[in-house]
Image (cartoon, grey):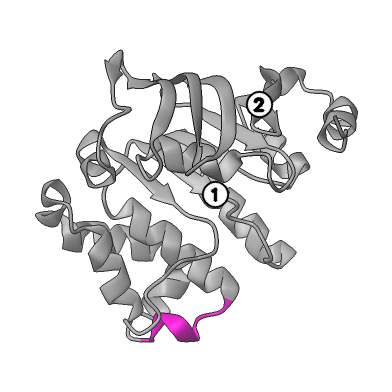
């Protein structure tokens, strides 16, 4: 169980998260929705140690990880797939993927895992010698996901994977998320497509202005209520 307890965090003197508490059960997909500026990406960065928590605690299976360095998160079998399809544009698809297996624990199985990624993302296999900067948006998102999975994570944080993609590619991405969920991965999904996000989730949080304003089991969510809260201004 990954837990965030009464956390405050932000950028310098600008606080973004306000006494926020969430829990992410093992093997479940939890989705976090909310408008731009709600603090969703800040939350993921804080969990991963990219931003310091100025108050509160973050724990994994009861052990505090709030002061862990970002580069230590791989040892906890955690990875972040960031927003914006951040790939190394001047490197090939395969080089990008192999960087994902850089953590010592993942290196021995890197070529076996590479074949698993190519099976999961056939387009990457077709383009393995191609420079990442020449990929389409959907292919770059697949590459970003594949690179994260090369570290063999048990906990996957993924930020806006469908942003700006064509509907057919969005279907592919959510299909992969469904597969990962069925493999008992713990997934924290930040997503603005509320219908798709709630549809795949076990649990849903809605954030606004750095706070959680709604939480529920996904099967009990009323999308109309969510949308009213989503667009509320307070």
- Mark 2 is surrounded, within 10 Å at the Cα level, by few (under 14), some (14 to 19) or many (20 or more) other residues, namely some
Secondary structure, mark 2, is: strand
Q: Is residue 113 left or right of residue 221?
A: left
Q: Is residue 158 magenta?
A: no
Find the distance from the CA under tag 1 to the CA under tag 2: 18 Å
The answer, for residue 184, to whether it is visible in the render is no
Q: Is residue 131 magenta?
A: yes
Rendered view: 9 above or below 166: above
Numbered tag placed on residue 211 in the rendering: 2
Q: Is residue 157 left or right of residue 190?
A: left
Q: Position of residue 16 (x, y in %)?
A: 59, 37
Q: Residue furthest front?
A: 13
Nearest to viewer (mark 1 / mark 2): 2
* Residue found at x 70% / y 29%: 206
The one of 171 and 9 positioned closer to us in this rendering: 9
Q: Quadrant of residue 157?
A: top left
Q: Quadrant of the N terminus?
A: top left
Secondary structure, mark 1, is: strand
Q: Is residue 115 left or right of residue 142?
A: left
Numbered tag placed on residue 159 in the rendering: 1
Chain part drawn in magenta: 130-136
């Amino acid at each position: 169980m990954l837990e965030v307890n009464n956390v405050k965090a932000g950028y310098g003197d600008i606080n973004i998260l306000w006494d926020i508490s969430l829990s992410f059960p093992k093997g479940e997909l939890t989705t976090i929705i909310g408008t731009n500026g709600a603090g969703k990406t800040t939350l993921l960065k804080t969990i991963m140690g990219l931003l310091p928590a100025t108050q509160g605690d973050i724990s994994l299976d009861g052990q505090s990880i709030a002061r862990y360095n970002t580069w230590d998160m791989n040892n906890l079998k955690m990875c972040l797939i960031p927003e914006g399809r951040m790939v190394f544009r001047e490197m090939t698809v395969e080089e990008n993927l192999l960087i994902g297996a850089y953590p010592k624990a993942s290196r021995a199985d890197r070529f076996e895992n590479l074949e698993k990624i190519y099976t999961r993302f056939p387009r990457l296999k077709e383009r393995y010698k191609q420079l990442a900067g020449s990929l389409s948006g959907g292919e770059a998102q697949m590459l970003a996901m594949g690179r994260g999975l090369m570290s063999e994570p048990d906990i996957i944080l993924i930020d806006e994977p469908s942003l700006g993609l064509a509907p057919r590619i969005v279907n592919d991405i959510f299909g992969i998320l469904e597969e990962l969920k069925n493999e008992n991965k713990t997934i924290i999904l930040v997503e603005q497509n509320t219908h798709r996000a709630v549809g795949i989730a076990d649990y849903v949080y809605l954030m606004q202005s750095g706070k959680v304003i709604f939480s529920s089991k996904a099967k009990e969510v009323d999308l109309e209520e969510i949308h009213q809260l989503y667009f509320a201004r307070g």
